[in-house]
Image (spheres, grey):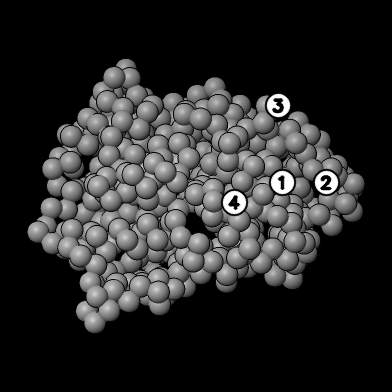
Amino acid sequence: MKPSSPALAAALACLAVLATACGGSDDAQAGTGTADKPVEITYWSWMPGTKDMAAEFNRTHPNIKVTFAEIPAGLNGGYDKLAKAVKAGNAPDVVNVEYQALPDLVTQGLLRDSSAEFADPVEKYAPASVRGLVTLGGKTWAAPYDVGPQTLYYRKDLFTRYGVEVPTTWAEFEAAARKVKTASKGEARILDFWGDDTATWAGLAQQAGAHWYGSSGDAWTVNIADPATKKVADYWKDLVQDDLVLNHKAWSPESTKAVTDSKAIALIGASWSAGGIKTTYPKQAGKWAEAPLPNWGTPATGAVGGSSFALSKDTKKAAAAAEFALWATTDKAAVKARLAAGTSSGLPAAEDLRATAKQSFDASFFGGQDIYAVAGAEVPKIAEGWVWSPVHNSTTLTLQTEFGKVNKSGDFWAAFQAGQRAAEKAITDRGLKLAK
């Protein structure tokens, strides 16, 4: 489905978003203040490094003062808080939004149509695959910051100890998983899979050729339970049932302990995962490396996460808010400020900022490996044609619940079937058309 598909355009129109999400206040395009009287804007984010980035903007832009507020991550965290703030009339001027959440927030009427501020610069700096994630109904709703190709992180020392080569295909990965279990005498597994993490599954499905959402005319199609996704689900079912991978809850203490104790020696992540691994496992410095994700025989990967800067629907300071958002997504100083602390490793969507990112992020934890070169080389391999729907946020909650029921049975396919039903129902419940 193209970004300006009839289905999405119809979704926006039927929810009357286009009439209300454009701001429209008299001072929406007001100037950006002076050093003596700066324009004050508010910015909400949960992402590492963004507080430092906002402080650097304030230091170098005396005409605008950004007040930063940290919000919780997740569907029931910051996005729910944003919805309540818009309803109450006290929303921030700028907020970070993940790509998969953007269509939902747009069709709820929470964000401002920022085509006037963002369309031209986004066209110039963001690759087409990323532009499509922020261009909905023919309008630009956010400025992309990063792109998140899915990659494999692994313990170099333990791969060597167990005589395992870095796998390049999923067949090789299964063989490596068996070797790790045998060579470690059952003490270690190649991976803690995080089988309840919908974002991981979406990336793996995308790599395999799935398209969970699409359109037929002005109606939405849902294909979560499609053959490509079933292939992926069956693959991981076999690995879980054969006890070749661990399957702890994502981000859980159990998962952290498994990696800390060298019981799991690799993780599936994305370009932004390096900062989190570095922060979580400081005693394993120098032992980790990043590699392309194994594939199904043809080089390809999926995208996981990735974030943008959006203006809330009712901001009355659009010019100042847009200036900050564009600085945050296109300026080298913003990248330096955000990555210098080492907690964030986001891969800028703007390719000309990646050298700055490399220089700003201390990669000694990865033995000096150029992780930005590894991740950057994967961006062109991101499988094309993937889009998100306005109901993916609610569908994610269903999927997470169903995935959480899976332990050693590995019956992930039942969760995808439940997700299919939930997405179809959510589309009709929102008053959108569902293709027959």
Q: Earlier in the sequence, mark 2 or mark 4?
A: 2
Q: Are marks 1 and 4 in contact (CB under 8 Å)?
A: no
Residue 72 in picture, x, y percent from top left: 40, 64
- Residue at x-position 53% and y-position 41%: 303
The disc labelled 1 sits on which kind of residue?
Ala
The disc labelled 3 sits on which kind of residue?
Gly
Q: Are marks 1 and 2 in contact (CB under 8 Å)?
A: no
The disc labelled 2 sits on which kind of residue?
Lys
Pointer 2 residue:
181
Residue 291: assigned label: 1
> Quadrant location of the N terminus?
top left
Residue 297: assigned label: 3
Q: Are marks 2 and 4 in contact (CB under 8 Å)?
A: no
Q: Earlier in the sequence, mark 1 or mark 2?
A: 2
Q: Are marks 2 and 3 in contact (CB under 8 Å)?
A: no
Q: Earlier in the sequence, mark 1 or mark 4?
A: 4
Residue extending furthest toward the left: 26
Q: Are marks 4 and 3 in contact (CB under 8 Å)?
A: no
The alpha-carbon separation of the residues under discs 1 and 2 comes to 21 Å
| Visible residue check, residue 409 | no
Residue 326 in picture, x, y percent from top left: 37, 57
